[in-house]
Amino acid sequence: MSVSLVVAIPLALLAIVLLLCFVGCDRVFGLSSSPDPFDKYTESILAEPTLIAYWPLGEAAGVTTASDLKGNRNGTYLSQVFPADPAMSSAAAPGTLMLGQPGIVPGDTVPPHNERATCIAVNGGFVSVPFDPALNPGKADGFTLEAWVHLGWSADPTVDPPAFRTIMTALDQIGGLRGFWLFVNTDNIWEAFVGNGPGPTIVTGPQALLDTTSHIVLTYDGNLVRLFLNGTQVTAVASDYVPSDQSRLFIGAGAPHLPDPRFPWVGEIQCVAMYKGALSPDQIATHTFHGNGSESP
């Protein structure tokens, strides 16, 4: 065997080993050899073709604008003291709005630095987004609402009396109830209103677990309202739908059709998104897995 061949064989083997290592270890460099790579949750959401708006709510403390990374439909961070309103089951809140809190979506942690995106913690803090027709799609178009939330209130009614807790909403009462409202009700059950003109269609899901992070999605396809919890459909109800033509969109507080917001959320909110049309069950399950830092269902 010639000297050149003796040298060439180990070098070829070394090249193969290095190639295999690069393919197998490419996650370390934020790369992927798969045809449909997943690098982090935010990137996977921004890649959805029907996405209308996406508010990660990851701004640093002191920032006043909640940026929409898709369509520049930016919101404003606000906070206020909420008085208790027992007649409407709206809880008192001290006006807490804390930005830059530890994120609740593991899928936004990516190598090599393992920097987790942050979120907001609220108890009387919320986001107000100006009215935009795109955020109020018509019945024929349908829509999807999506958010990751951590339920932070107490199960002790002497500490936190039963109350409605809003994730996101855009409602008005001009000629009947119009728009949508995604929330947890006074019995700590996932619920949604879809305004159909004369009144709401009420969509009720399972019990909401306190001190727990959840991925919650509401879809409307022009016929059925569906509620998904952690990637699984939990209810479906037939409904008409009339969108608001004037309401702001609120995140973390509710009832913009009233003179002042009500129903403040208590806990963390992150990665709020809205889509045109209804996402499929497979898409929603994939979002849940990506949010949990997994490649696929």
Image (cartoon, rainbow, N blue to C red):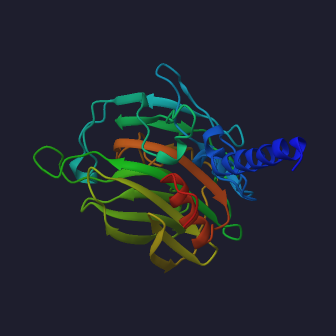
| Camera sees residue 171 | no
Q: Is residue 93 above or below residue 244?
A: above
Most extreme residue toward the top is 62
Between residue 11 and residue 264, name the one nearer to us.
11
Q: Residue at x 87, y 41 (%)?
A: 3
Residue sitting at 63 percent across and 68 percent down?
278
x and y, in percent, of residue 157 in the image: 13, 51
Tell me the quadrant of the picture where the C terminus can be found. Answer: bottom right
Q: 45 or 224: which is nearer to us?
A: 45
Q: How many marks?
A: 0
Q: Is residue 59 visible?
A: yes
In the image, 202 versus 190, the foreground residue is 190
Nearer to me, 258 or 29? 29
Quadrant in the rendering for residue 189: bottom left
Residue 193 placement (x, y as % from top left): 45, 64
Q: Position of residue 258 (x, y in %)?
A: 43, 46
Figure check: 253 above or below 244: above
- Up-down: is 96 above or below 145? above
User: In the image, residue 109 lies at what x, y percent?
Assistant: 52, 40
Relative to 58, is 14 on the left or the right? Answer: right
Using the rendered view, name the quadrant where residue 65 is placed.
Answer: top right
Q: Is residue 263 left or right of 223 when viewed as pictured?
A: left
In this rendering, the answer to whether 189 lies above or below 157 is below
Residue 241: name its quadrant: bottom right
The residue positioned farthest toward the left in the image shown: 158
